[in-house]
């Protein structure tokens, strides 16, 4: 079996799709599948080509034994929709051009968003006599419309038509959450769907490989109670809630909030921190993936918020998994499926109403003042993700599905 993953985002970039796709590719390779990746020159999330790749229009490399083909991409640090579309379509074009040099495959698995990459996936699959699988990690254009990222009615109409075309041309449409799968199956009952969840790579998160000095190196006191948000600093996350909660808890000197990552909202959040004079909020840059076990093992709990929108009721933020794998409870500001799985069923943390800073502050205090509860919730979460979200098992299940197609 030969598989080509087509994705705009891949290591050495850090982030949810990058980690998830690379892990899946490695596990499939271990099962005897011939796996290759077609992706862009790394640039995300700072929208700058990584130093080792500057000046290259395209290249091939191996990452953990996976052959990676890299195509050029148009990069500009701009929030404008026109520049975003240029970014997306430049990779659609360059990936199609580069694909002429690639071998034939049994499957082309395309990661969406960006939705437009499905154009390239469809044409590559036809060229390579492959079956197309479309993996949906975010319902686009629906989410873009509801977040007011795209407001042009004509553009939205075209995007919805493209979405329908790609689903119907795919032999299988996979969704990262059950909510995504239900949404697609409800709108397209003749499309074959499959839940392909995110999870934890327990090989990487081996407790005997942790450098436990991160907390000391950063100068935190022994009694510090550290809460971590690590991920994209974007509009959808609603990270203002963390700063507003920190404002309510400034009298508790031991409680510290770390916001780790980069993204389009970082400058605004830094300005908000300065305006509010929040000494209990610390911003950290994007941290290489291999250092994250040391970071996560040093914290007390993870804060995971999203905006209060109905579309996020079917979302499962990828950042829930790794803290739980290390026995760290989560404070979850996401309702719907995520709450049902990790709070109601997994008993792995506390829930707060999205965008409600007072509720978040109360949840933080609950854990800070009750160490035994914090430990118990963390232990519950570690067992829950091990039983239900082990990436090795997820990959094996997908491999069995692919063999039946």
Image (cartoon, grey):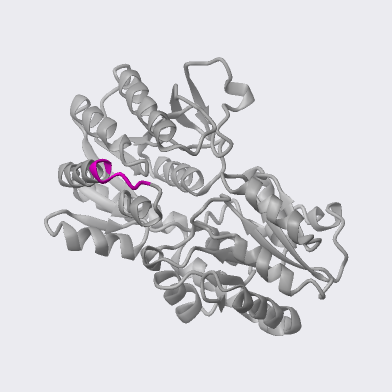
Quarter the N terminus occupies: top left
Compared to 184, does 28 lie above or below? above
In the shown orientation, is residue 400 left or right of residue 311?
Answer: left
Q: Is 223 in front, or is 64?
A: 223
Residue found at x 44% / y 63%: 316
Number of marks drawn: 0
- The answer to whether residue 261 of the structure is visible from this angle is no
Compared to 203, does 221 lie above or below? below
Residue found at x 72% / y 84%: 370
Relative image position of residue 336 (x, y in whole percent)? 40, 73
User: Which region of the structure is painted magenta?
Assistant: 150-155
- The answer to whether residue 18 of the structure is visible from this angle is yes
- Is residue 128 one of those drawn in magenta? no
Residue found at x 27% / y 57%: 194
In the shown orientation, is residue 393 left or right of residue 250?
Answer: left
Relative image position of residue 65 (x, y in whole percent)? 50, 32
Relative image position of residue 216 (x, y in whole percent)? 86, 57
């Amino acid at each position: 079996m030969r598989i080509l993953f087509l994705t705009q985002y891949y290591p050495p970039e850090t982030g949810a799709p990058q980690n998830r796709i690379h892990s899946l590719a490695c596990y499939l390779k271990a099962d005897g599948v011939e796996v290759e990746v077609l992706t862009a020159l790394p640039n995300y999330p700072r929208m700058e080509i990584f130093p080792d790749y500057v000046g290259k229009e395209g290249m091939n490399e191996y990452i953990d034994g996976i052959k990676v083909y890299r195509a050029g991409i148009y990069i500009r640090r701009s929030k404008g929709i026109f520049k975003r579309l240029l970014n997306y379509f430049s990779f659609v074009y360059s990936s199609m051009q580069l694909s002429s040099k690639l071998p034939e495959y049994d499957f082309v698995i395309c990661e969406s968003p960006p939705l437009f990459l499905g154009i390239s996936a469809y044409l590559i699959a036809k060229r390579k006599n492959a079956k197309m699988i479309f993996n949906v990690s975010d319902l686009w254009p629906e989410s873009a419309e509801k977040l007011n990222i795209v407001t042009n009615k004509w553009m939205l109409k075209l995007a919805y038509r493209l979405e329908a075309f790609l689903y119907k041309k795919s032999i299988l449409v996979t969704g990262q959450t059950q909510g995504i799968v239900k949404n697609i199956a409800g709108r397209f009952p003749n499309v074959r769907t499959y839940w392909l969840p995110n999870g934890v790579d327990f090989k990487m998160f081996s407790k005997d490989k942790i450098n436990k000095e991160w907390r000391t190196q950063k100068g935190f006191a022994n009694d510090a109670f550290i809460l971590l948000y690590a991920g994209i600093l974007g509009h959808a996350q609603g990270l203002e809630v963390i700063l507003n909660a920190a404002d309510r808890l400034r009298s508790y000197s031991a409680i510290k909030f770390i916001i780790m990552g980069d993204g389009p909202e970082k400058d605004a959040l830094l300005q908000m921190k300065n305006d509010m004079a929040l000494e209990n909020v610390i911003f950290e840059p994007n941290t290489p993936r291999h250092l994250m076990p040391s970071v996560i093992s040093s914290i007390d709990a993870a804060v995971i918020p999203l905006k209060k929108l109905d579309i996020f009721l079917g979302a499962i933020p990828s950042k829930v998994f790794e803290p739980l794998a290390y026995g760290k409870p989560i404070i979850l500001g996401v309702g719907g499926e995520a709450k049902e799985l990790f709070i109601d069923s997994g008993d792995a943390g506390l829930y707060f109403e999205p965008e409600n800073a007072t509720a978040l502050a109360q949840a933080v205090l609950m854990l800070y003042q009750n160490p035994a509860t914090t430990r118990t919730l963390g232990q519950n979460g570690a067992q829950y993700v091990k039983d239900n979200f082990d990436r090795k098992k997820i990959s094996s299940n997908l491999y069995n599905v692919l063999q039946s197609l």
